[in-house]
Image (cartoon, grey):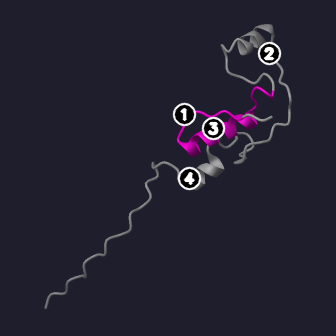
Amino acid sequence: AEHSEPAAKPSAPSKDDSAEPEFETLQLHAGQVPDPTTKSRAPPIYASTSFVFDNDEHAARLFGLKEFGNIYTRIMNPTTDVFEKRVAALEGGVGALATSS
């Protein structure tokens, strides 16, 4: 008599590696990539209140909004940038703005 194998059970759907990250993952990692030098996964907290400029022309481009960069912490800093990108990702937005009083 012929022996037949039982029919294979359908497998559970696999996670597609190209799928968008889930909400929980976005809460922890959106808006930031691992640091290529230190390999740190978490963003550093920049406690600086001001930033230096390469020269007068660099400062003029930053203040003229012709070049993206950090000028003064109340306007923008790298830690706030990660926070704003994370909130935008969580809310499905294209951008976010963090403010305080």
The numbered mark, 3 or 2, whose residue comes first in the sequence reads: 2
SS state under label 4: helix
Left or right side of 7 for 40? right
**x 70%, y 41%: residue:** 35
Amino acid identity at mark 2:
Asp
Left or right side of 72 for 10? left
Residue sitting farthest toward the bottom: 1
> Which disc number belongs to residue 85?
3
The numbered mark, 4 or 3, whose residue comes first in the sequence reads: 4
Q: Position of residue 69 (x, y in %)?
A: 72, 23
Residue carrying label 1: 94
Q: Is residue 94 magenta?
A: yes
Task: Tell me, yes or no, whether the two marked residues, 1 and 4, touch with CB atoms within 8 Å.
Answer: no
SS state under label 1: loop
Up-down relation of residue 29 to residue 78 (above or below): below
**x 63%, y 34%: residue:** 96
Residue bounds of the magenta highlight:
73-98
Q: Count residues near mark 4 (Cα–Cα under 10 Å), then give few for <14, some for 14-19, many for 20+.
A: few
Amino acid identity at mark 4:
Phe
Residue carrying label 2: 54
